[in-house]
Image (cartoon, rainbow, N blue to C red):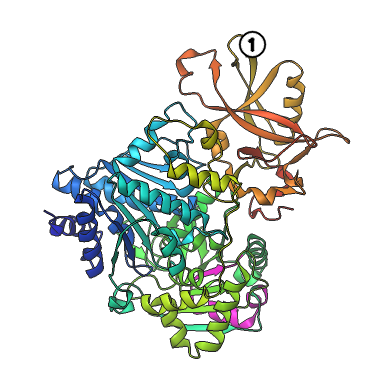
Amino acid sequence: MLDLSLIEKEYQKLGFIEELRFFQKEAIKRLFECAQSTRPRSLLVRLPTGYGKTLIGEALLAYESIAGDWSIARGLTYVLPTRAITHDVRIRLEKHFCNIGIKDIKELHGESDTSDFYADVSVATFDTFICAYARKTFDYHLEKPAGVIATSYLVFDEAHMLQDKYLYSHNLMSKILASCSEAGVPILVMTATMPKQFEETIFESVEKESVPDNIYDFKESVKSYRGLIERVDIKKDMKLLEYVKSSEFKNELKQKRRVLIVANTVERAAEAYKKLQSDQELANWEIVLIHSRLRLDDRNHREKLVRRLMQPQIKCDCNTNHEDSLPLYLDGDKIICKNCATKKLREVSGIIIVATQTVEAGLDVSCELLITECAPADALIQRAGRCSRRPNEENGECVIVQPVDEKPYPKILVQNSWNYLLNELKSEEERAIHLTSLVHSYEFINKAYKGFEVKRIPEISELSITLRYLEAIYPFVVDHSAISKVKARPSAPIFLFAPLKDEKIPVLIGLLKEKKQRYILEKRVLELTAHELVAKARELNEENKSLFVDKNTVRKRLFTIEKAYLSIKKEPCNILLFDLNRTEKVVAKLNYTRITMQDTSIEEKAQYYRINLHRLKEAKIEEGTYMLNPDFYDEKCGLVRVK
């Protein structure tokens, strides 16, 4: 029998919570009831941003560890829509679980160093989860990932963010829910802003329970679980780049120290960042650009900094018992309070994050001033969830500017949301309520999605094949043809390896042994720039040799991008092309390859990518990892223009 006080007391003792909120308790109780049933119903939890949904997702495993009763689930598989959110949630879960004896926590996505779900807690992107569930793995254990998933309980968090014109990802979830429910796997789906249309698609084939049972049963005041947004100002005749140059914006910065600017595209985010960086009046401000086309290490470093600086109170690295607010001082990566600072240190008056949709969920920050382009209602509500996020913050302000165009969203969603804000919500108070209150935001979202038409999935396509395959998947029956066509999203993500222009990359030379069909790597390490690497790879091809790059070297410099951005009229676009001479252009693809080491003691752990060159006329961009031409990557701004 569930004793909720065990979790509550332990988490209070560790300083994680003051007390469990009413609907946290209700959701945890329902999750346990569902999990203990022989045919568990799926559970939908719809609660507002900042309410503490992650705690609900972790509660079942936390209870098992605290109570010493492991009779319900072996582990937790926590599924999220993007790599950025996966990283942030893994950090939060690690903080909680490591204090109650659960140490084996993995982060799984295309840029991680493992695809093995065998852990107490696996925090995975939706794409990685789908591939593991469907047995599209890169090792020899086809059943292992699916078996591990089947003995855990499943959490799909921020499920509203999986959007495409077919609702393809939601159809995939529907198939998985049906199959896992039949197998007795407990499933929890959590959201703050899912449109009714998406909900109906996901739960089409299964019975579900909901918390709250009816959205109108949620009557908690906004200030009980988050801070307040005082003002929502609509700039109907002003674009983002105009606003950040305006005197009004400069006046706001006299009062606000933590600012978040959200653009709808990477290009506009980079333009806004450059304008702010060049403004001498902001010389003492820390200005950080975050978007999806930054290298993994670069982005992790930036996110780590903003997680700390974008809080009302920040711990000093000289005196960890002392907290202070901005302005503060920076000593490299260390944050120093006013009491501990010396004259030599750089003062940081405030922080401005310039970002794209990547900050809409997962990144646990709280700004005083949010400036955003208009976007679909659900996206705006998520962005507002980063403003005055903490209880007792009462001075949040939000400015919504007119978008340049609707991209990358469906036009009707942006138009409906903009018109509703302008014409239906007359006061700043009304707008604030519709961005923060669960009931009002639900109504806002569904009105924005009125008239949104879902496209029909083509019958003869990899998308249809994947859906049919998931309906008929059986243990130990392997359909290699169907598995090879499995897609988690309509537009496949491509991994880009992005060395900087003058950066030296350590590489090894490998000789192909025909009898073994494996490469033997030499011990000698070469250090080459990207352009030198391509030229050397071409030279070695004529000697039956290849260049190899260590997986960790690649992983630190990776990011993902949709396949649609990388070709023009079926030919690779310029960002992937390298000139070998005036007449020949090539694409460099990185293929994971089994190798033989001269030092056999490290062979089992060695993981390398082989550099394969493809002539432009023969190159076809498919799923996989490619090297980005470094002439198109900027260390500060990342990859901005792709075509």
Q: Nearer the viewer, residue 13 or 267?
A: 267
The number of discs equals 1
Residue reaching furthest bottom?
426
Q: Which residue is mark 1?
A: 514
User: Residue at image x 31%, y 78%?
Assistant: 216
Name the spot of residue 156 as percent of width and height, x first.
38, 54
Amino acid type of disc 1?
Glu
User: Residue at image x 54%, y 62%?
Assistant: 357
Find residue 4 and report its image quarter.
bottom left
Q: Is residue 181 visible to us here?
A: yes
User: Residue at image x 41%, y 73%?
Assistant: 388
What range is drawn magenta here? Answer: 241-264
Q: Nearer the viewer, residue 203 or 592?
A: 203
User: Residue at image x 51%, y 36%?
Assistant: 483
Find residue 434 and report its image quarter.
bottom left
Q: Is residue 343 visible to us here?
A: no
Name the spot of residue 37 as percent of width and height, x first.
20, 51
